[in-house]
Amino acid sequence: MRAIDVSIEVLICKECGHIMNSQHYDDEIDAFYENDYDLLMDSEDSQELFLDRTGHPVTKLERLFQPFKQFIENLGLDPGTYLDIGCGKGLALQAFKKIFPKWDIWGYEVSNRYKPFLEKHIDQDRLILGSPHLLERLAQKFDVISLFDVLEHVKDPVSVLRSAARLLKVGGYLYLQVPEIYEGYMDWLIADHLSHFTLDTVQLLAALCGLKVRSVVDHYSVGGLQMICQKSERISEEILRKRLGNVYEINKTIMNAHLRYWIRYGSRVYDLLEEAVEMKKPFAVFGTGTAASVIPVYVEESLNWIACFIDENPYRIGKKHFEKPVVTLYRIPKEVDTIFLGIAPQNIKYILPKLKASKMRTVWVI
């Protein structure tokens, strides 16, 4: 039986213990974000869909912004200055401006591709587009800075976070969101996720950068970790070295467990393909995210047997994924009687009840 090759070479940062992809993207990653990173750019409203802790679908903005909104309201500050680093299409900036219109709002994005979206919601002299070095030269100081799903995309999160911390006013707050690898099985296979974090490594990273963790929000969304930090003194090297020891062993255990999961996943895919060829019947794949995309990326011949992808995201339904239609559960082609769950393992328990009504055979990774 064959298995998808999901071997991943990783390194562990000697400064804070976060896990890094060992491949060197130094000459490629900046060009990728500038020229090829087309994340849901078909419309201003297009968003990814996630499940919250109750299994309820929420948009990316809801997932990121609801806890952040509560944090800003609880601060009780007079209107101040706010910077969103890695602001993308500006969804968070748009929501922030609507709720807190008196704040002085700034945005930074490495790619110019989002400029047409951003100019609708932020003054041009408050919009910074281009190299991260532009932030290093910025003289403005901020009361609040946010980094929503940014640090996993950079090859040196220590320098990025230090740069952000430098831009904070004394007593200012930094709001940080990253994927969390205990639950983040998908995180490993996203090519532009160059760094991977646990709660311990994010706390160590913050301490390295002169930030004190005030609170952790890990109850709102599955696989996401949000933290509120405040400008502080850097942790001593002696304390840091003691805490790093445990992080190394924990991270090795996590890596091994996740790799075993993906090996099983690959075996399941090949079993399903062999069955489809024998029975001459196509199958459907539930999901259009990373796990679902692994199948055609790693097993090109699978496209001959995938009839469609199934998704609940209204921004995906009616579109195509790998040139196959994206449909709802109620629009599956008649010739299909098997659904493969190409979704994060922690979400399966929420999806299975919805599939019972379809009376189709469901294949998933145990």
Image: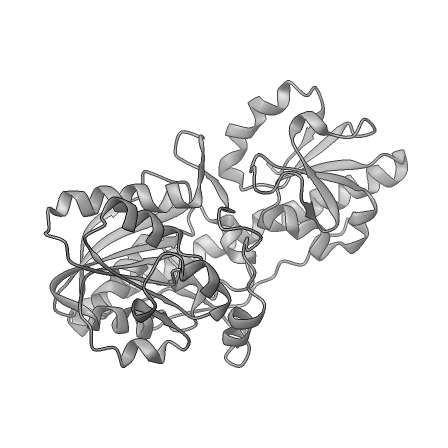
Instruction: Determine which quarter of the picture holds residue 58.
Output: top left
Specify the quadrant that holds the C terminus: top right
Residue at position x 51%, y 69% in the image: 33
180 relative position to 288: left or right: left
Instruction: Determine which quarter of the picture holds residue 244.
Output: bottom left
Q: Is residue 28 above or below residue 186?
A: below
Q: Is residue 198 above or below residue 58?
A: below
* Viewer can see residue 196: no
Q: Identify the image's colour scheme: rainbow, by chain, secondary structure or one colour.
A: one colour
Instruction: Return the residue nearer the eye: 273 or 331.
Output: 331
Residue at position x 31%, y 53% in the image: 199
Residue 146, percent from left and from top = 29, 58
Residue 174, percent from left and from top = 23, 59
347 relative position to 317: left or right: left
Residue at position x 50%, y 35% in the image: 347
Residue 361, percent from left and from top = 72, 26
* Viewer can see residue 303: yes
Residue at position x 73%, y 29% in the image: 332
Instruction: Return the residue nearer the eye: 331 or 199.
Output: 331
Residue 83, percent from left and from top = 27, 62
178 relative position to 264: left or right: left
- How many numbered marks does the figure carry? 0
Q: Is residue 73 above or below residue 249?
A: above
Instruction: Return the residue nearer the eye: 188 or 56.
Output: 56
